[in-house]
Image (cartoon, rainbow, N blue to C red):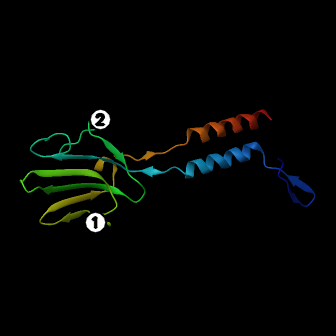
Amino acid sequence: MNWYLLASSTSWRPSLLLITASIFYLLLISDVESLQCYNCRGVSYYDPDSCFHPIRGRTVRQECNRGEVCETRIHREENFDEIIERGCTNACAGRTYVWTDYFQVHCCDTNECNNAYVKKFSYPLLFTCLIYLALSLIN
């Protein structure tokens, strides 16, 4: 398929290089920053290390959806066991702390509340762009 744009007496057709550059640009601006939070639930008396002291590589991490932040919720059961839950939430509504008589919630917006953003990247799209780039250099 040829695309032509007539301007005066000259014609212009976008090259594969221009198309490839455009796709690379769209690929770069479409990177998504995804927050990662620890995702666990533990009881203080029975499980003192897993959720109360999350450790990278041992504690499960969860990738949050857009608009969610990390949450740490601590509450007490009727038998006075302290329960801690960590994960993603959209219920913080911009607040850092929520304290009541029954629970404490701490919300934060950095990885593992914890370090760097993870970018989603489309490897098939990158491969396609590289093929187009190679073809444009050959022609």
Residue 121 versus residue 133: which sits nearer the camera? 121
Q: What amino acid is at disc 1?
A: Arg
Q: Are marks 2 and 1 in contact (CB under 8 Å)?
A: no
Side of 41 relative to 37 (left or right):
left
Q: Mark on residue 57?
A: 2
Q: Mark on residue 55?
A: none
**Residue at horizontal 72 percent and vertical 47 percent from the top:** 19
Evaluate whether residue 114 shows in this view. Answer: no
- Quarter-wise, where is residue 9 in the image? bottom right
Q: Earlier in the sequence, mark 2 or mark 1?
A: 2
Instruction: List x then y, in percent, for residue 113.
Output: 29, 50
Q: Residue furthest right?
A: 9
Q: CA distance from mark 2 to mark 1?
A: 29 Å
Q: Is residue 90 above or below residue 12?
A: below
How crowded pointer 1 is (Cα within 10 Å; few <14, some 14-19, many 20+) is rated as few
Q: Residue furthest left?
A: 79
**Residue at horizontal 71 percent and vertical 34 percent from the top:** 134
Side of 126 relative to 31 (left or right):
right
- Quarter-wise, where is residue 69 in the image? bottom left
Which of the image's four quarters has the C terminus? top right
Evaluate whether residue 105 shows in this view. Answer: yes
How crowded pointer 2 is (Cα within 10 Å; few <14, some 14-19, many 20+) is rated as few
Q: What amino acid is at disc 2?
A: Gly
Instruction: List x then y, in percent, for residue 111.
Output: 34, 48
- Quarter-wise, where is residue 132 in the image? top right
Residue 11 versus residue 47: which sits nearer the camera? 47
Residue 40 versus residue 55: which sits nearer the camera? 40
Q: Which residue is mark 1?
A: 95
**Residue at horizontal 79 percent and vertical 49 percent from the top:** 14
**Residue at horizontal 49 percent and vertical 45 percent from the top:** 120
